[in-house]
Amino acid sequence: MGQNLDIRSDPTTIDAPWMNEALRASGIAGSAVITKCTFEGFVGTGQTGCNARFSLTWDDPSGRPSTVMGKFPSFDATARATGFGGSAYVTEHNFYTRIAHTVKIRAPKCYHAALNLEAQEFCLIMEDLSGSEQGDQFVGLTMAEAELAIDQAVLLHAPRWGDPTLAQSGANPSTPEERSMQLAMIYGLLLPAFIERLGSRLESPIRQVIEDFAPMVGAWALGSGSPLTVAHYDFRPDNFLFARSPDAPPLVVVDWQTANEGLGMVDVAYMIAGSFSPERRREVEQQLVDLYRSKMNAAGVTYDDATCWRDYRFGALWGLIITVLATSMAARTERGDDLFVTMATQYGHLCLDHDSLSLLK
């Protein structure tokens, strides 16, 4: 993927010669040459990174993209430091270079991936999915869209379900015990700041379940006992691109900054709660969980009803973890705070409805 190129973390510095080498290394350029590369501006409101679109002029455009997207570190100092100091950028780089080709989920095609942690440089060049439209957690999903998400969850989880090499595929290989200790420590450290920032905007039972979960996070991280697989860990509407033109793929899943070994049902519970109001979610969750289980079985994974439903209740708790962690990691914005309050409410009600904490007592 053009690893001998210098890493361009600032999209405004990317020019035709650099882009030409990046795309030639990916194989899509062939013998054609990019004669002009234009930075067209930023796209979206990424919390931990920024996306930019580039238009390309080729001497032979036949079969070659006229635009591409780039993903770069955040320009916000706090978010950028967190991205490099934590695992966000290295995890996304790891997904595109080591994991994407081993699963069947429809992720963006990546033409170039480069990372240098020491120099704090990061860059991805990917296909432009301009014919698709990003989902919105404030709006949620229709049932048809949620069913498309279930299809993609199966394509992610089934290929490597119970794969004994999963631990070696991660960006930072570690034992379950190490992950347990680390997650419990991070949640405990960040919880007071989360409560101070957003606690007054939360319903009392929601705030209580978030606080009560703190001493149990380590036990949760050890898993439910079900086989592990590759999990997205931020599987929600804001990270879904739905087709809005006839030639676009029905659904593409983006933002792989949290992808790692984990319980597949974490993604499913997270998606369902994050896609519907608590009232609507109560009406549709059984149908969607049953759909996931039946499709996993059809893909060759043995998953009985009782175990699947237990894992749904168990996986619900991830929503609390990522809400607390993401609130501290992301650049603070009004929309961001509104999103985190919405997430805490949705995932908190899911955990309360299913008494998820009782699974850890």
Image: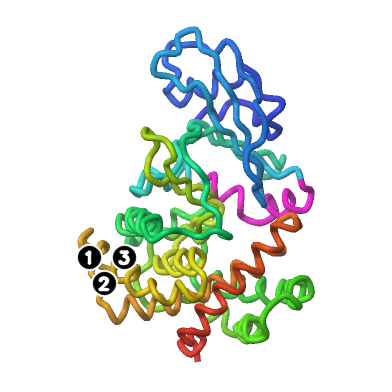
Q: Position of residue 55 (x, y in %)?
A: 58, 22
Q: Is residue 7 above or below residue 75?
A: above
Q: Is residue 306 above or below residue 80?
A: below
x and y, in percent, of residue 123 in the image = 61, 36
How many neighbours does mark 3 have within 10 angstroms: few (below 14), some (14-19), or many (20 or more)?
many
Can you name the residue that lies furthest to the top here? Answer: 59
User: Which sits in the foreground, 62 or 83?
Assistant: 62
The residue that mark 3 highlights is 292
Judged from the image, the secondary structure of the residue bearing numbered disc 2 is loop
Q: Amino acid at mark 2?
A: Tyr
Tag 3 secondary structure = helix
Look at the image and say whether residue 248 sits in the magenta stretch: no
Task: Identify the residue at image location x=39%, y=65%.
Answer: 264
Instruction: Give the mark nearer the N terminus: 1 vs 2.
Output: 1
Q: Is residue 255 left or right of residue 60?
A: right
Measure the alpha-carbon separation of dots 1 and 2. 6 Å
The residue pinned by badge 2 equals 303
- Looking at marks 3 and 2 on the same chain, the residue that comes earlier in the sequence is marked by 3
Q: Main secondary structure of the magenta part?
A: helix
**Residue shown at the point (40%, 59%) measured from the top left:** 146
Label 2 environment density (alpha carbons within 10 Å; few <14, some 14–19, many ≥20): some
Residue 260, percent from left and from top: 48, 58
- Callout 1–callout 2 Cβ contact below 8 Å: yes
- Disc on the earlier residue, 3 or 1: 3
In the rendered structure, which segment of residues is drawn in magenta? 76-93
The residue under label 3 is which amino acid type?
Answer: Tyr
Is the C-beta separation of discs 3 and 1 under 8 Å? no
Q: Does the rendering let one see residue 247?
A: yes
Q: Is residue 72 left or right of residue 129?
A: right
Q: Nearer the viewer, mark 3 or mark 2?
A: 3
